[in-house]
Amino acid sequence: MSAFPLHFGKYLLLRPLAKGGMGEIYMAGLGQIGGFEKLCVIKKVLAEKADPSKAKRFLDEAKVVLRLSHSALVNTFDAGEVEGEFYIAMEMVEGKDLREVWNQCVRQRQRIPIEVALHVAREVARVLAYVHGYGDLKLVHRDIAPPNILLGYNGDVKLTDFGLARSALKEEKTQPGVVFGRAAYLAPEQARGEEADGRTDVYTLAIVLWELLTGQQYLPISGLDPSAGLALVRHPKPTPPSIRAPWIAPELDRVVLRALAPDRQQRFQSAEEFRLALSDVIAKVAPRTDPARVVELMQAVFQDVINKERAEREHLLKDVIPAFRASSSAPPARERPTQPSVAHDKPRSASQSNRTPARTVHATPKPPGPREENHDGSDGMRLPGVTPVPVAVDGRAAHREAALRVLAELAAEDAAPTPSPVQARK
Ligand SMILES: Nc1ncnc2c1ncn2[C@@H]1O[C@H](COP(=O)(O)OP(=O)(O)O)[C@@H](O)[C@H]1O
Ligand SMILES: [Mg+2]
């Protein structure tokens, strides 16, 4: 029998969607009255990884993303804590992330149309311009890569996963020597341990665009030893996409190369500049670029999947959730706000044990394909001088204690903000 559905605060967890570096991702149900349920996505901190720095990163992420609203951003509408586990709740995108799209295209020997590549890049540039210019926060995504770009079956392009975002809101010091993010999608300045800025996101978006245009990996580091890989990431020799895809026009080559300049002074100085350059080149070389091209591609490569997923959603909404609600008599576990005032909590009773998800949730299997990165974005390569963040595995009590420590720290920080660490984040 499936371990799902499970009560989780005001949500019902329906099944795991993915498991990555920062948290477990679930498809979830929201609603109380039969027939008025809505599906959404819950992202939780991994219990075994809830050491203070991880939990704090998660809360930092939640604080930031709750404020943002843009049509090319996965909308996050709630964040909180249930029995010591932090979560954010967001809209569910009916579609696939760009890595899955890429892999599916490879399996079906389909080329990603140039219009789709350009539309995705322009949409991500558009949302980056919004994010970078949001208030005075100096938000940077820092993890622009295929798994964090979702393509809707309806043609939407949506950026997600601010797990590695840093802004003026964030005073968290990362461990010295830690390089977050996937090595193949790091800008040279990130690989040197320098502070990321908006131009860093421009660069990594340009890598994604280069790869969509050519169907090849921009920096083939998978087979290299770590120090050679790191050297390549730090000192890339930019190649125009037309070397691999001769049909690419020189003006598009120029735009991509400018965004890929290793020295950020030589790049587009903002995502908006990049977007405008893309718009100009689209008008010349691919004027039929629009969301309909994304719909066509998604329908062509995911035809069966789309129907299966639609049937699954219907089944969940019409059968599974109502039956579960009818059969579960006790009220759901009470949700608490993320406040430090929850220090004295009773230990979980046996009767509550069916109200939180099983501790071990199996990840959805990684689809086979050319991309070798792990789900968390690491490509399996340990960079020299890179220390993994230590992980506390002391069970629920330690998790809770760590969570509360972080909340207290955050409250103190809110009262007296500390200055940004002078040391460049590594
Ligand atoms: N709102 C969403 N709708 C649909 N799929 C999602 C959503 N959020 C995440 N996913 C899927 O889960 C994966 C991991 O989510 P992400 O937020 O990137 O977490 P991680 O920190 O593990 O990278 C994504 O690559 C995507 O495939
Ligand atoms: Mg991600």
Image (cartoon, rainbow, N blue to C red):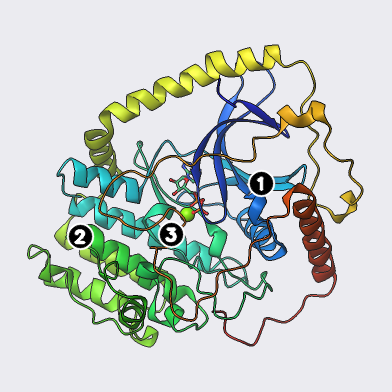
Q: Is residue 279 visible?
A: no
Q: Is residue 399 visible?
A: yes
- Residue denoted by label 3: 377
The residue type indicated by label 2 comes to: Leu
| Residue at left offset 47%, top offset 56% | 376
Q: CA distance from mark 2 to mark 3?
A: 21 Å
With respect to residue 400, does 94 lie above or below? above
Element at label 3: loop
Q: Is mark 1 within 8 Å of ligand 1?
A: no
- Residue denoted by label 1: 87
Q: Residue furthest right?
A: 344
- Residue denoted by label 2: 213
Q: Nearer the viewer, mark 2 or mark 3?
A: 3
With respect to residue 190, does 66 lie above or below? above
Q: Position of residue 172 (x, y in %)?
A: 68, 72
Element at label 2: helix
* Sequence-first tag of 2 and 1: 1
| Residue at left offset 31%, top offset 68% | 206
Frontmost residue, 182 versus 264: 182
Q: Position of residue 185 (x, y in %)?
A: 37, 68
Q: CA distance from mark 2 to mark 1?
A: 36 Å
Labelled disc at residue 393:
none
Q: Position of residue 246 (x, y in %)?
A: 7, 65
The residue type indicated by label 1 comes to: Tyr
Q: Is mark 3 within 8 Å of ligand 2?
A: yes
Frontmost residue, 48 versus 273: 48
